[in-house]
Image (cartoon, helix red, strand yellow):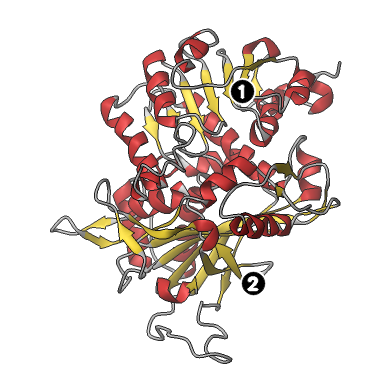
C-alpha cells in the first residue's frame, strides 16, 4: 500500500506545529480528503493511528486507505452522536467537522464539555434544518445558525478553542478584508497603525469610507466530462452548495443604504447586522468584479461571512444604533457546469438532481479567483484575494481542485493557530490572528494580490433599456442587484 510519504512528501522542516492529540474527522467529502494530506505534512509527529474518520457513507474511503487511517461509516444523528464520538475522542483531541447535516451547535457544546479543539467551515443544522417548512424563513437562515453557535459561546465562555466557519469563505476572506483595509490606507497615505481590537478595525473601515464588501469569486475550472441532464456538477460539495442555495439570500446591511429591497426583511432577534430576502440565493443575482473576469453576475448565496464581517466592522453610535456598517454579501459565479446545474435545479422547483459529481481529476483547465471587493472609498474599489489555477493546485497538493485547496489551506492555517492558542473558546475568523493564518495558507493560494478598478455597478447601464438607478451613489444595493 502507498504510504503518506508517497502521497505527499514531508520532512521535519515542513512541520508548522507539534500536536500530541488525535484528529477526528466528522465527514470526509472533498474538503476532508484534501485536508488530510496537509495535516500529515505540516503537523509534526502525526501518525495514522492518531487519525479517525467518522462519516455517513463510503466517499473518501480509498483516499483514507492510502494513509492507513481508521474509517468508520457511522452517520451522526441527535440520538447517537455523543456515544459515537465518546468512543473515538479524548480531552485534548481535535475534532474537524467537514460534514453536512450535523448540528454545529451540538458539536460545539459537546467539544466544550469534552475539552476538544474544534474547527468547521459552516454552521450546519441537523438534517432538514434548511428546508423545514415549519420554520420561518428567518429561522432557516445562516443568520439564525450563527446566532445558535454564538449562544453556545455565551453559555461556555473560554475553554478549548473552537474556530467556527473557517474555510475559504467564510474564513479566509475575513483575513483578506483586513489586509485590503491596510493596503487602501497605505495607498491613501494615511498614518494608520495596524488595529489590534474589533473597535479599531471597525473604525478604520469607517474612516476609509468602505460602503460595501463583496466576496467576489469567479471559478473558471472546466471538466473534460460535460454535465449530463439530471446531474449536479460542482467543484466542491454538491450537498453543501444545494443546501445553501435554497436558503434565503442574505446580506449584511450597511448604514449607507437608503431603503430595503421590496422583499427584504429584518430579523427580530440577534445582532441585527443582516437582512434576508424572501427568495432563495440561487434565484438572486448581483453584480460584482474580479481582476481576470472583470464585471460579472454572481449568485447572492447566503454565507456566514456576510453576517460576521458586517457585524465585526460595525461602529456603534452613542444611542446604541449602528453609526457605521458596510453592506456585505457573497457574489458567486461558480464553474460553468455548476451554473448549468443551478439552472436545472431552479427549473426542478429546487428539488436536487438524482446524481452529483465533484470535479477533481477530470478538471482540464481554469482557476478559482476568490477575493474581497471593498468599494465606495476614495479610490473607488479594490479587490484583494487569491487566484489559483488547477495546474498550480496539482503541483502543490493531492486529492483536490483549486476551489478545495483554497478551503483546506485556510483550514490548515486556523488549525495551526488553534493548536498554538488552545484555550480561546469559540471564535469566528475575524477574531483570530489574520497574519498567522495567511502566513500558513499563502504558499497554497497561488497568486495573492490586490488590484484597483474604476468599475461600478452603473457601468453600461440604462443604454438599451431604461432602468431605475441611483445615480448619486453607485454602491447602493439597488444598483448592485440584478433584476
Position of residue 132 measured from the top left corner of the image (x, y, whole percent): 42, 41
The answer to whether 248 appears left or right of 159 in the picture is: right
Q: Can residue 160 be seen in this view?
A: yes
Label 1 SS:
strand
> 320 or 62: which is nearer to us?
62
The part of the image, by quadrant, that contains residue 369 is bottom right
Label 2 vs label 1, nearer the camera: 1
Position of residue 72 measured from the top left corner of the image (x, y, whole percent): 64, 15
Query: Crowding near pointer 1: few (<14 within 10 Å), some, many (20+)?
Result: many
Return the residue at label 2.
Answer: 294
Position of residue 109 measured from the top left corner of the image (x, y, whole percent): 37, 23
Disc nearer the start of the sequence (2/1): 1
Image height check: is 6 above or below 362?
Answer: above
Image height check: is 313 above or below 239?
Answer: below
Q: Can residue 194 be seen in this view?
A: no
What residue occupies the far top of the structure in this picture? Answer: 87
Return the residue at label 1.
Answer: 55
- Residue at 67% across, 59% down: 339
Distance from disc 2 to disc 1, alpha carbons, whole Å, reads 40 Å
- Residue at 49% across, 39% down: 122
Position of residue 200 measured from the top left corner of the image (x, y, whole percent): 32, 52
Image height check: is 307 above or below 22?
Answer: below
Image height check: is 69 above or below 131?
Answer: above
Query: Crowding near pointer 2: few (<14 within 10 Å), some, many (20+)?
Result: few
> 13 or 23: which is nearer to us?
23
Is disc 2 in contact with disc 1, using a CB cutoff of under 8 Å?
A: no
Amino acid at each position: 500500500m502507498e504510504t503518506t510519504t508517497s502521497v505527499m512528501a514531508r520532512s521535519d522542516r515542513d512541520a508548522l506545529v507539534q500536536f500530541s492529540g488525535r484528529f477526528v474527522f466528522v465527514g470526509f467529502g472533498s474538503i476532508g480528503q484534501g485536508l488530510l494530506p496537509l495535516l500529515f505534512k505540516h503537523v509534526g509527529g502525526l501518525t495514522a493511528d492518531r487519525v479517525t474518520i467518522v462519516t455517513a457513507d463510503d466517499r473518501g474511503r480509498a483516499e483514507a486507505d492510502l494513509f492507513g487511517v481508521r474509517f468508520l461509516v457511522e452517520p451522526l444523528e441527535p440520538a447517537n452522536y455523543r456515544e459515537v464520538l465518546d468512543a473515538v475522542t479524548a480531552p485534548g483531541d481535535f475534532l474537524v467537522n467537514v460534514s453536512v447535516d450535523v448540528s454545529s451547535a451540538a458539536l460545539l457544546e459537546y467539544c466544550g464539555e469534552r475539552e476538544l479543539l474544534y474547527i468547521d467551515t459552516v454552521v450546519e443544522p441537523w438534517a432538514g434544518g434548511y428546508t423545514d417548512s415549519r420554520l420561518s424563513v428567518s429561522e432557516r437562515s445562516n443568520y439564525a445558525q450563527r446566532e445558535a453557535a454564538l449562544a453556545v459561546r455565551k453559555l461556555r465562555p473560554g475553554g478549548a478553542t473552537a474556530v467556527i466557519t473557517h474555510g475559504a469563505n467564510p474564513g479566509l476572506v475575513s483575513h483578506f478584508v483586513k489586509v485590503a483595509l491596510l493596503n487602501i490606507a497605505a495607498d491613501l497615505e494615511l498614518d494608520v497603525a495596524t488595529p489590534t481590537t474589533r473597535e479599531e478595525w471597525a473604525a478604520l473601515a469607517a474612516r476609509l469610507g468602505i460602503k460595501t464588501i463583496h466576496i467576489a469569486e469567479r471559478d473558471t475550472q472546466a471538466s473534460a466530462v460535460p454535465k449530463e441532464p439530471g446531474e449536479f456538477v460542482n467543484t466542491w460539495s454538491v450537498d453543501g452548495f444545494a443546501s445553501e442555495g435554497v436558503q434565503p439570500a442574505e446580506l449584511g446591511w450597511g448604514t449607507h443604504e437608503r431603503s430595503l429591497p421590496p422583499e427584504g426583511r429584518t430579523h427580530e432577534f440577534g445582532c441585527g447586522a443582516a437582512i434576508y430576502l424572501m427568495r432563495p440565493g440561487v434565484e438572486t443575482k448581483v453584480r460584482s468584479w474580479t481582476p481576470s473576469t472583470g464585471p460579472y453576475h454572481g449568485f447572492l448565496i447566503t454565507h456566514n461571512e456576510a453576517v460576521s464581517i458586517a457585524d465585526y466592522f460595525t461602529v456603534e453610535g452613542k444611542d446604541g444604533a449602528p453609526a457605521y456598517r458596510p453592506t456585505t454579501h457573497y457574489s458567486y459565479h461558480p464553474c460553468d457546469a455548476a451554473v448549468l446545474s443551478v439552472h436545472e435545479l431552479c427549473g426542478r422547483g429546487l428539488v436536487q438532481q438524482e446524481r452529483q459529481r465533484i470535479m477533481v481529476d477530470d478538471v482540464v483547465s481554469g482557476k478559482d479567483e476568490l477575493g474581497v471587493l471593498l468599494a465606495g472609498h476614495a479610490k473607488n474599489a479594490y479587490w484583494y484575494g487569491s487566484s489559483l489555477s488547477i495546474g498550480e493546485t496539482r503541483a502543490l497538493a493531492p486529492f483536490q481542485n483549486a476551489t478545495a485547496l483554497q478551503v483546506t489551506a485556510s483550514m490548515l492555517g486556523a488549525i495551526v493557530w488553534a493548536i498554538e492558542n488552545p484555550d480561546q473558546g469559540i471564535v469566528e475568523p475575524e477574531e483570530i490572528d489574520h497574519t498567522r493564518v495567511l502566513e500558513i495558507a499563502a504558499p497554497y493560494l497561488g497568486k495573492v494580490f490586490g488590484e484597483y478598478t474604476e468599475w461600478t455597478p452603473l457601468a453600461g447601464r440604462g443604454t438599451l433599456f431604461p432602468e431605475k438607478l441611483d445615480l448619486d451613489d453607485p454602491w447602493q444595493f439597488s444598483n448592485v442587484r440584478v433584476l
